[in-house]
Every structure is written in C-alpha cells, then in structure tokens.
Amino acid sequence: MSANGYTSRPIAWGQRNVVAVGALLFLLGVMRFIRADRFGFVDVLRCCLAVIPMALLLLVFDYVLHRAKLEAVVPLVVALALVVSSPAFDVVLGLAVIGAIAGPALTEWKDERRKLQLLSERG
C-alpha cells in the first residue's frame, strides 16, 4: 500500500443498519402522511420544529446507552411514544438518525479526500 494510493474503507455494518432504520422510519412517516391524505403548512412546521427536540432525544439516548444500558429503555420508550403519536415524529426521527450517521461520515470522507489531494500536490 502506498501513501499516495486511495484506501477504500467500507462503512461498518452497524452504521448501515442505523441508516436503514432511519430510512425506514422516514418512509413510515411519509406513508402515514400519504395515507392520511394531508400534508399542509402546519405539518411542515411541526416537522421543522421537531428536528431539534428529536436530535436532543438522540443525544440523551446515546449518553444513557453509554452510561447505563438498562436505563436506555426510558428514552427509547419516549421515542416510540412520539413516533406512534404523530407521523411528523417518524419523519424527523428518521432524518435525525440518518443525519447522526451521515454527518460525521461525510466529514471524514471530505477530510480523507483533502489529505489525498495535498499528498498528490506535494509528491
């Protein structure tokens, strides 16, 4: 392996599974909106306003999961209750889960490309 060669690393299975669950939640919410035959301005506003609380819920769940695995059931039950209560929470939780994985992965990919570009310019 050379320093100038591009090393391709596959995404870990855990990340793929989390993104798949996020996509499933997103599609479930979209299907619930389609079945209800409504998606107005109020629903768009609900989705936009629910992004930050859902991201905070994910952050709390991650923290609790790393500190006390048994107590991680509580934020999971809260997320499940929110998902069942409204399709907006399905959509937002799916997007938050995908964003939690895709954001760092894209940043890492861009940093690798930048390093490779710098190496090719020097050598």
Image (cartoon, helix red, strand yellow):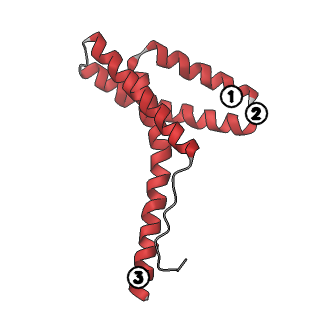
Say few, some or many: other residues with alpha carbon within 10 Å of mark 1 (under 14 / 14 to 19 / 20 or more): some
Q: Which mark is residue 68?
A: 2
Q: Residue at x 43, y 55 (%)?
A: 106
- x and y, in percent, of residue 74 in the image: 66, 22
Residue at the far front: name it.
1
Q: Which image quarter: residue 69?
A: top right
Write down the residue under mark 1.
72
- x and y, in percent, of residue 20 in the image: 47, 35
Label 2 to label 3: alpha-carbon separation: 46 Å
Report if residue 20 is visible in the image: yes
Q: Tell me the kind of residue under disc 3.
A: Ser
Q: Vertical placement of 1 versus 27: above or below?
A: below
Q: Residue at x 47, y 80 (%)?
A: 4
**Relative side of 32 to 73, left or right:** left
Q: Secondary structure at mark 1?
A: helix
Q: Vertical placement of 87 versus 109: above or below?
A: above
Q: Tell me the kind of residue under disc 2.
A: Ala
Q: Nearer the viewer, mark 2 or mark 3?
A: 3
Tell me which label, 1 or 3, sits earlier in the chain. Answer: 1
Q: Secondary structure at mark 3?
A: helix
Q: Residue at x 56, y 49 (%)?
A: 12
Q: Which mark is residue 59?
A: none
Residue at the far top: name it.
36
Q: Residue at x 25, y 14 (%)?
A: 38
Write down the residue under mark 3.
120
